[in-house]
Image (tube, rainbow, N blue to C red):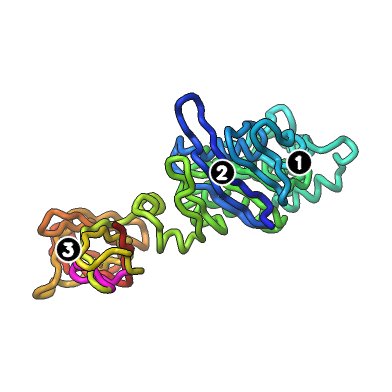
Amino acid sequence: MSRVAVAGLRKAFGARQVLAGIDLHVDDGEVLAVLGPSGCGKTTLLRIIAGFLEPDAGEVSFDGAAVARVGSGVAAWERKIGYVPQEGALFPHLDVRHNILFGLPRRHRTAQRLGEMLELAELPDDLSTRYPRELSGGQQQRVALARALAPRPRVVLLDEPFSSLDAALRVSAGRQVIRVLRNAGTTALLVTHDQGEALSLADRVAVLDEGVVAQVASPAELYAAPRTVRVGTFVGDANLLAGVLAADTAKCALGVVDLRSRAAMPEGSTVTLLVRPEQLRLTSPEPGGTVGRVEEVTFYGAQVSVRVALPDGTTLLARVDASGVPAMGDEVGLHVVGVAGVYP
């Protein structure tokens, strides 16, 4: 049985339909990321699960028991939810100790429970007397998580918890928070608009698009086999090429390309191919092969992004190792390694 189950969830604000029939489940102990652009309904979904909003239709269940449906539901404070909002929302006038223990009944606000939560959140004991302003951004997020975990919630909801942190701190804070959740065995929903964050931290990722769940899959499957072009371009850089379908291949500007799966269309159909930048190999030009001209080279440490223009005007992005990178204006050959996604 799923720890959290959402079925047919709908929510509108005036004429704007934000959620248009969401079906989703989160298994016990799983970290599920809900990924989508700003305004797609991620936070609305989280707030309905938490009990801060009522749905227009559909149902939310915890361990098989309904907690939210139209006209009835369990109050937010009775759902045993841990909620970590953007920027942690710590009480600035309380020290770490009182922030962590705030949501517990007085009889449970013990030194033992505080010590357990500090250890779980990988925070040193001497931080307990400091105030939020004296902590780093990553430490503040772990204090907020410890506060959410202290009452032993059934599920923790994290609403863009790292959005206020700089890029380097986002990565380290994200890894630390997920490690804490896994050590606690806690079921969690992480809402984010950051593709890298979702793919690197979650067990599964649900992509929201125009009020519905476009795809739910493991990070590896989502990146390698997106269900639609929109999902594919949202979860990572992608080259889109027009092609003509054959048996198990398609012909495009890069020649004949193997396909991940055969589309349910007759041979000769025009299709769209999706090729990831790391699938492109740049070589010396070969007679009869595809040749392009390097338009842009961008270094990212060990890897380099190379933008290549084909004779027909198509521009492709390749991601290659930093050794042997072509120079601006060079002519290069292009080959696809592996299989391409294919879409109508």
Q: Residue at x 46, y 46 (%)?
A: 194
Near mark 1 (Cα within 10 A), the count class, few <14, some 14-19 or many ≥20, is some
What residue did someone put label 2 on? Answer: 8
Closest to the camera, between mark 2 and mark 3, is 2
Task: Select label 1 or label 2 by which is in front.
Answer: 2
Which of these two is toward me, 233 or 333?
233
Q: Marks 1 and 3, how far apart in space? A: 61 Å
Q: Is residue 252 magenta?
A: yes
Crowding at dot 2, Cα within 10 Å, few <14 / some 14-19 / many 20+, comes out as: some
- Whether residue 256 appears in this view of the structure is yes
The amino acid marked with disc number 3 is Ala
Q: Residues within 10 Å of mark 3 (few under 14, many from 20)?
A: some
**Residues at marks 1 and 2 touching, judged by CB atoms closer than 8 Å:** no
Q: Position of residue 205 (x, y in %)?
A: 52, 54
Dot 2: element = strand
Q: Position of residue 15 (x, y in %)?
A: 45, 26
- Numbered disc 3: secondary structure: loop
Main SS of the magenta segment?
A: strand
- Depth check: give the residue in front, 169 or 335: 335
Residue designated by label 1: 128
From the top left corner, tell me how far across and down residue 197 is, in percent.
Answer: 50, 51
Q: Residue at x 57, y 59 (%)?
A: 203
Which label lies toward us, 1 or 3? 3
List the residue tagged with mark 3: 253
Which residue is at a point 76% across and 48% down the rendered structure image? 117
Nearest the eye: 297 or 40: 40
Q: Quadrant of residue 80?
A: top right
Identity of the residue furthest to the right in this view: 107
The residue range painted magenta reads 248-260
